[in-house]
Image (cartoon, rainbow, N blue to C red):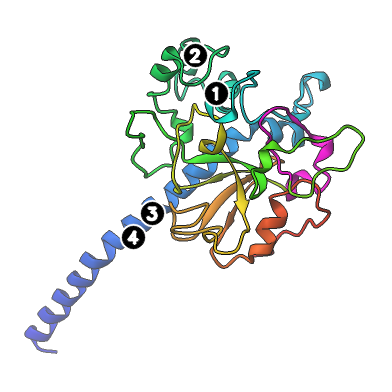
Amino acid sequence: MSRWIVVALLVLAALLVAGLVPMLVQRTRLDANLVGSRNNLRELAFFAHLHANPDPKAAVAALPKEIPPGTVPLPGVAPHDRLSWAVPLMPVLDQKRQDLATLLAQIDVTQPWTAGPNQTAGRTHLVVLVCPGTTPGTTPEGAATTCYVGVSGLAPPDPATLALPAGGPTPPRAGAFRYDAPTPFDRVTDGLSQTLLMGETANDPGPWLRGGPATLRGLDDAPGAKPLVGAGGQFGGYFPSGGQFALCDGGVRLFTPQTTPGVLLRLATIADGKDEMPVD
């Protein structure tokens, strides 16, 4: 083999490596961000995770038995003007990751999210609510946004307004979260591992501190609605592989744009009796 052929092969190999390395770095970073987002969802779903995997040393009475309300209830105040579900979760999130106790002390839970102190606190990004690899977002007014929203069932209309009558049937479009009251685990008759709790969304991100559609949404199955998952869809949009959801048992699952829509729609409700989970 001549010297020039060897040189040409070496140059070709160098070019291939030069092109391959950035691709490998990008892929590694993407995979790490996917795992980071999965961990965020797991942390947010801690109360359900504890229920499914209780600490043997913990008192049974201390274990959560319900999904908290989707807003901080405030009589006479509309859900979209209340504080979101993120506020009552703050004391039990990872304080080493971010000093949430100090931030929580600035929030007045007896006032709407529009109150001055709450607006000030709402400008701080919650690390656990920012999808890794994504620039933390803000609204034009300066409020920090969330990359994760609770799943309230099937829309329209807004399923978070549906009540769960005591001793009566569960509305078939009801999901894990409701605005005004908690959802007992025993009302999730489809199974905690078969019911969506929270999901990633790059679709019209809203303030993490605000109740209503900013932090709580149903899957819209109306004709002409956006795709359920994927770029430009109702959920997902951060990763080309699809969108991740936390389930009510604390697990996290990735759904791709190829996932049968009917499967996601069934998983969005708590008691439709059709607990189908796709198989990879």
Please state, as top left, top right, bottom left or bottom right, where the C terminus lies in the image: bottom right
Q: Is residue 127 magenta?
A: no
1 or 2: mark nearer the eye: 1
Which of the 4 image quadrants contains residue 144?
top left
Residue wearing tag 1: 83
State yes or no: discs 1 and 2 in contact (Cβ < 8 Å).
yes
C-alpha gap between disc 2 and disc 4: 44 Å
In terms of secondary structure, what is the magenta stretch mainly?
loop
Q: Earlier in the sequence, mark 3 or mark 2?
A: 3
Amino acid carrying mark 2 in the image: Ile
Q: Earlier in the sequence, mark 2 or mark 4?
A: 4
Q: Which mark is residue 24?
A: 4
Residue in the foreground of this view, choosing between 17 and 192:
192
Residue 58 in the image: above or below residue 244:
above
Which of the 4 image quadrants contains residue 77?
top right
C-alpha gap between disc 1 and disc 3: 37 Å
Q: Earlier in the sequence, mark 1 or mark 2?
A: 1
1 or 3: mark nearer the eye: 1
Please state, as top left, top right, bottom left or bottom right, where the N terminus lies in the image: bottom left
The number of numbered badges drawn on the structure is 4
Residue wearing tag 3: 28
Which residue is located at x 65 percent, y 18 percent?
A: 75
Residue 28: image location, x then y, percent: 38, 54
Amino acid carrying mark 3 in the image: Thr
Amino acid carrying mark 4 in the image: Leu
The region drawn magenta spans 174-194
Q: Which mark is residue 107?
A: 2
The secondary structure type at the circle numbered 1 is: loop
